[in-house]
Image (cartoon, rainbow, N blue to C red):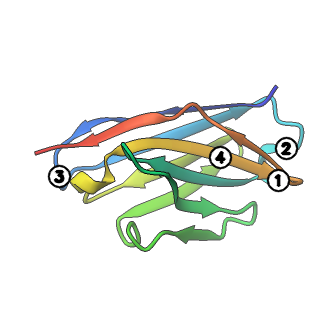
Amino acid sequence: QVQLVESGGGLVQPGGSLRLSCLASGMIFSFSANDMGWYRQAPGKGRELVGTITSGRVTNYADSVKGRFTISRDNTKNAVYLQMNSLKPEDTAVYYCRSEAGGIFHWGQGTQVTVFS
């Protein structure tokens, strides 16, 4: 059974930083073969893409986070990370990790990020 477990969320002031982690287990395909993504959902809004990193380590970001957020992965630890800098109140959301391989998607349970003054 595939499990994605996010951690690292919390409360932070505007301009601050957080690093989210997503640890994967139970994958049918090896972790390195998965494209990984970070998504977020703010209160009252739909889930939106934050960014992705492919199995080949190509990254892609939403315009709203470009230059502030960085996605990386460590295949030896079955982990993907989201480094978030220069956080803004509008970054407040539940952040989810997603894996995809062979057309099969899995989601984590999410971690809350709150940016407040």
Q: What separation in Å lies between label 3 and label 1 (alpha carbons)?
A: 36 Å
Q: In terms of sequence position, does the residue under pointer 3 or pointer 1 come before the other?
A: 3
**Residue 88 x %, y %:** 23, 56
**Residue 75 x %, y %:** 71, 47
Query: Disc 2 marks which residue?
Result: 30
**Residue 107 x %, y %:** 66, 39
Q: Secondary structure at mark 1?
A: helix
Q: What separation in Å lies between label 3 and label 4 (alpha carbons)?
A: 26 Å
Query: Disc 4 marks which residue?
Result: 98
Q: What separation in Å lies between label 2 and label 4 (alpha carbons)?
A: 15 Å
Q: Secondary structure at mark 3?
A: loop
* Labelled pair 1, 2 in contact (Cβ < 8 Å): yes
Going 45% across and 34% down the picture, which residue do you hit? 111
**Residue 1 x %, y %:** 82, 25
In the image, which disc is placed on residue 33?
1
Q: Crowdedness of circle 4 by 10 Å Cα count: few (<14), some, many (20+)?
A: many
In the image, which disc is placed on residue 14?
3
Q: What separation in Å lies between label 4 and label 1 (alpha carbons)?
A: 13 Å
- Is residue 8 in view from this perspective? no
Between residues 68 and 46, which one lies in front from this camera angle?
46
Of labels 3 and 1, the one closer to you: 3
Q: Crowdedness of circle 2 by 10 Å Cα count: few (<14), some, many (20+)?
A: few
Q: Is residue 108 above or below residue 102?
A: above
Q: In terms of sequence position, does the residue under pointer 2 or pointer 3 come before the other?
A: 3
Going 45% across and 47% down the picture, which residue do you hit? 41
* Labelled pair 2, 4 in contact (Cβ < 8 Å): no
* Amino acid type for the residue under numbered disc 4: Arg
Q: What separation in Å lies between label 1 and label 2 (alpha carbons)?
A: 5 Å
* Labelled pair 4, 1 in contact (Cβ < 8 Å): no
Of labels 4 and 1, the one closer to you: 4
Question: Hey, which quadrant is residue 20 in on the image?
Answer: top left
